[in-house]
Amino acid sequence: MKNATASAVMVCALAVCTSAYAGGNTHEMSDAAGTSNASGMNMANGATSRMSHGEIRKVDSAAGKLTIRHGPLENLGMDAMTMVFKVRDPAMLSQVKAGDKIDFVAEEVGGALTVIELHK
């Protein structure tokens, strides 16, 4: 009976340790800007952490698309390249012209890579 109880305690302890490991480190962490929270993410700057840098190569107002030469898109796991993006808001197209340097956020929306945020 003692072996069964000891085994049950060990299984429970192992389960707790495994779930704690899978859940990640819950200790407070700080980011480079000095803000922090329990998960280590910069909550005040969430969109900015997905921000990428690029240069407008072409504006296609008729198709509602931008051709952007960009650096890595970390949130999409893509390397630097030049590619065509849809825009979430057609008003974005009138804010930029070929040659403009931009910061932007792109996400996959309905199966298409789409610029959801744009700053000159």
Image (cartoon, helix red, strand yellow):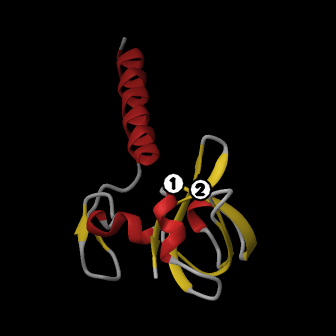
Percent from the top left, x then y, of residue 60? 68, 66
Badge 2 element: strand
Q: Considering only vertical position in the picture, is 93 above or below 80? A: above
Give the Cα separation between the discs numbered 2 and 1: 6 Å
In this rendering, the label closer to the viewer, 2 or 1: 1
Badge 1 element: loop
Task: Indicate the amino acid at tag 1.
Answer: Arg
Q: Observer-nearest residue: 72 or 24?
A: 72
Percent from the top left, x then y, of residue 74? 59, 67
Can you identify the residue that label 2 sits on?
A: 114
Check whether the beta carbons of the residues at disc 2 and disc 1 lie within 8 A of each other.
yes
Residue depicted at 32% across the width and 67% down the height: 42
Q: Which mark is residue 88?
A: 1
User: Badge 2 local density, few (<14 within 10 Å), some, or many (20+)?
Assistant: many
Q: Observer-nearest residue: 24 or 31?
A: 31
N-terminal of the pair, mark 2 or mark 1, is: 1
| Image label count | 2
Residue depicted at 41% across the width and 15% down the height: 4
Residue depicted at 46% across the width and 44% down the height: 22
